[in-house]
Image: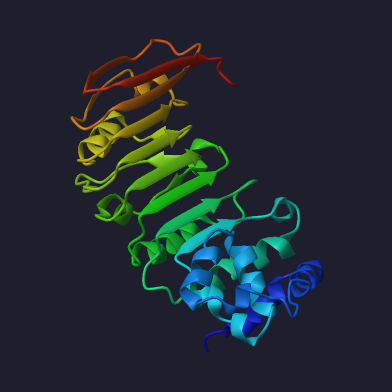
Amino acid sequence: MANSPAQTTKLTSKSQEASLRACISSNDRISSLPDALIHRILSLLSTKQAVATSILSKRWVSLWTFVHTLDLEDSHRCRFYEQDKMKFVHFVYIVLLLNRAGSVEKFLFRFNCDPVCDYLCVNTWICSAILRGFQEVDISVPEVLKKDLMKLPSGLFLMKALKILKLNGGVMVDVPSSVCLPNLKILHLLRVEYANVESIRCFISGCLSLEELHIDVRISPENMVNFSISSPTLNSFYLALPYKFHPHPQIEINAQISDFESTLRCQVS
């Protein structure tokens, strides 16, 4: 049996409830706004904050379930306390289950510490969001050993509505043979690993409208000695390489770039 929106209030702290209830007064103007406008306001908050508004009054119980943004972030306590870890996992499943927005415009997912749960769990959440046709994805996870890298579901590389994709940290970029991201305009690949050189070539070639590309290389040189970037629509390119990156990769760029920046930084052991 599906949980009701009211059940999610158990995930809010007493201090949150107290401060939120303090917002209610005879001069409360926000509650008099149309639902659509309140949904837009709630989309500017993190999902946890949006859910917490459900305790304000009966009218607010389900307003958060129509928000088109999913902004999920774990707590540092999840690293040390199993109970907090399980609460976070339960919270994400409840949010995905009860969200009634027709589509998800933004999907932001951040881990602040070691993975709080199996990445199969995370992929399930991403697949659930994929079915809703999001336009912006921002995933940030801690850097981990190669065997623990997060692999993204292949469906992510076939999102026709996707416009912004940002990947940061312990993610393995292993793209399928066919990539179709016709509307992707902004791509950030920061401190991620690549399965092979062909992965990045195939990735970028499938982005037919790419305008901005940021690559922060933190991979073994043998995986990325030489590679080419071909994107006729690209006009902004940022590349960061470790200072001790040897041999230095040979990069061939086929694009009309008006804004190019390359940075060498010290290698982090």
Find residue 223 and report its image quarter: top left
**On the picture, is 190 further left or further right than 227?**
right
Q: Residue at x 52, y 53 (%)?
A: 109
Find residue 226 and report its image quarter: top left
The residue at the far bottom in this view is 1
**On the picture, is 121 further left or further right than 113?**
left
The residue at the far front in this view is 27
> Number of marks in the image?
0
Q: Residue at x 46, y 16 (%)?
A: 263
In the image, residue 109 above or below residue 87: above
Q: Nearer the viewer, residue 92 or 244?
A: 92
The percent position of residue 215, horizontal first and vertical second, equals 40, 28
Q: Nearer the viewer, residue 1 or 26?
A: 26
The percent position of residue 163, horizontal first and vertical second, equals 32, 48
The percent position of residue 5, horizontal first and vertical second, equals 58, 81
Q: Looking at the figure, which quarter contains the C terminus?
A: top right
Colour scheme used in the picture?
Answer: rainbow
Q: Residue at x 61, y 80 (%)?
A: 60
Q: Residue at x 32, y 62 (%)?
A: 133
The percent position of residue 84, horizontal first and vertical second, equals 72, 62
In the image, residue 173 above or below residue 70: above
In the image, residue 183 above or below residue 49: above
Q: Nearer the viewer, residue 132 or 121?
A: 132
Q: Nearer the viewer, residue 186 or 225?
A: 186
**On the picture, is 48 further left or further right than 1?**
right
